[in-house]
Structure formats: C-alpha cells, structure tokens
C-alpha cells in the first residue's frame, strides 16, 4: 500500500524466477470513479482506524483544532511559507489528507482533544513505556507522542508500585585514614 503512492513500472516475471509471486495473484477491485489514489488513501484510513475512536469522532476533532486545519491546508496547497505549524515541515512529504483525516505515513494524526483518552486506553494494562509506545505507534502518531507516554508511565502510581525494584549500589570498602583528622564521619 505504501508503494501505490509512487509512479513505477511493474514487470511480469514467471513464478519460477520470482520469489514475490503473490503480487501477480493479488486481485483488488478499484473504484474507477475516484481513481487509484483515492482507493489507496481510503485503504490507509481503514487500516489506521482505531477501534476505541470512531473516524467521524477524529474527523470532528480535527476540524475543531486550528493547528490541524492549517496543516491540512499546507498539505493540500504544498505551500509551507505562511504555515505556523512548521514543526511538521521536516516530515511534510510523509503527510497526507483524506476527507479531513490526516495521515503521517500509514498512521493517523490524532488531535490534541483525543490524545489524553487514547493514551489512557493504551496504558490501561500498565505494561510500561516501551509496550505502550509500541501499541500506539502501530496506528497513530503525533509530535511529542513518545514524551507524553513517558510522562504518563512515570507518573502512574500503579506502574511505579509494580515496576522492577532497582538494587542499591553495593557497599564498597573504604581504607582507613593514614593519620588523625584526615577523614571524619558521623553516623546518627
């Protein structure tokens, strides 16, 4: 699906000489009214949909967030000169717009309004930072998502109670002083 966005030439090779024979057997019906590019984005949106959030809910929240509205306009026009969300410029080639839903590669960009709820749902099992990040990275993305996951896991009381106990540093032997008043210590 990622390659459908590019222009390339497909060359037939018989199955005996071609390991990737499955591509010649794949038979998808494309709605010719909208074109192949529409089908590609519709399939991406379908695969990026999160069961916990409905696409129409994300659509409404995206329309109500000024930063994402402006980002959508920058993507459509290709003009980033007057855009206040220049932090997305380095990944501008990976961003796509499909009926008000924004995609970053194959993952959906979630509006700020829904991020807290999505973070809480992903963190529900208290599996830690790495697993929570990997669960989210499968379908969604936004700038600073990793930091938000880390902050949530580090401030979660249940995660702190069940996390691995860090062993204290082993006690090292200290040499006795070679003369009086060189090393003073008190144990209260």
Image (tube, helix red, strand yellow):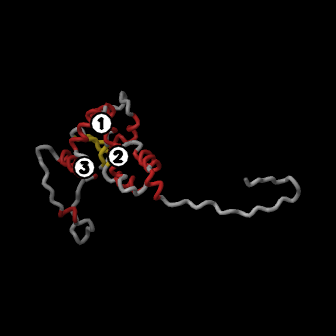
Where residue 34 appears, as percent x and y from the top left, is 14, 43
- Asked where in the image residue 29 lies, by quadrant, the reply is bottom left
Specify whether 26 is left or right of 170: left
Asked whether the residues under the numbered discs 2 and 1 touch, taking CB atoms below 8 Å apart as contact, a structural biologist would say no
Q: Please provide percent x and percent y for residue 172.
A: 71, 63
Disc 3: which residue: 49
Residue count near mark 2 (Cα–Cα under 10 Å), binned few <14, some 14–19, many ≥20: many
Callout 3: few (<14), some (14-19), or many (20+) C-alpha neighbours within 10 Å? some
* Lower position in the chain sequence, tag 3 or tag 2: 3
Q: Are marks 1 and 3 in contact (CB under 8 Å)?
A: no
Q: Which residue is tagged 1?
A: 75
Label 3 residue SS: loop
Q: CA distance from mark 1 to mark 3?
A: 21 Å
Q: Residue furthest right?
A: 179
Q: Is residue 7 visible?
A: no
Whole-percent x, y for residue 53 in the image: 25, 46
Q: Give the CA distance from mark 3 to mark 2.
A: 12 Å
In which quadrant of the rendered view does residue 27 lie?
bottom left
Front in this rendered view, residue 142 or 188 = 188
Identify the disc placed on residue 141: 2
Instruction: Name the residue located 26 percent from the left edge and 40 percent from the top edge.
Output: 97
Picture layout, residue 159 above or below residue 144: below
Please tell me whether residue 172 is drawn above or below residue 122 in the rendered image: below
């Amino acid at each position: 699906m990622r390659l459908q966005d590019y222009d390339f030439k497909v060359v037939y090779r018989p199955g005996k000489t071609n390991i990737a024979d499955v591509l010649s057997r794949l038979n998808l019906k494309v709605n010719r009214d909208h074109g192949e590019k529409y089908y590609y984005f519709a399939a991406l949106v379908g695969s990026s949909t999160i069961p916990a959030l409905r696409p129409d809910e994300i659509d409404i929240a995206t329309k109500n967030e000024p930063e994402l509205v402006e980002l959508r306009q920058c993507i459509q026009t290709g003009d980033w000169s007057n855009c206040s969300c220049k932090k997305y410029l380095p990944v501008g080639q990976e961003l796509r717009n499909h009926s008000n839903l924004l995609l970053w590669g194959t993952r959906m960009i979630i509006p700020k309004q829904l991020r807290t709820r999505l973070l809480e749902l992903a963190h529900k099992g208290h599996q830690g930072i790495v697993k929570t990040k990997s669960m989210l990275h499968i379908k969604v993305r936004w700038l600073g998502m990793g930091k938000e996951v880390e902050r949530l896991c580090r401030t979660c009381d249940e995660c702190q109670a069940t996390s691995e106990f860090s062993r204290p540093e082993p006690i090292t032997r200290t040499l006795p002083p070679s003369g009086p008043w060189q090393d003073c210590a008190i144990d209260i």
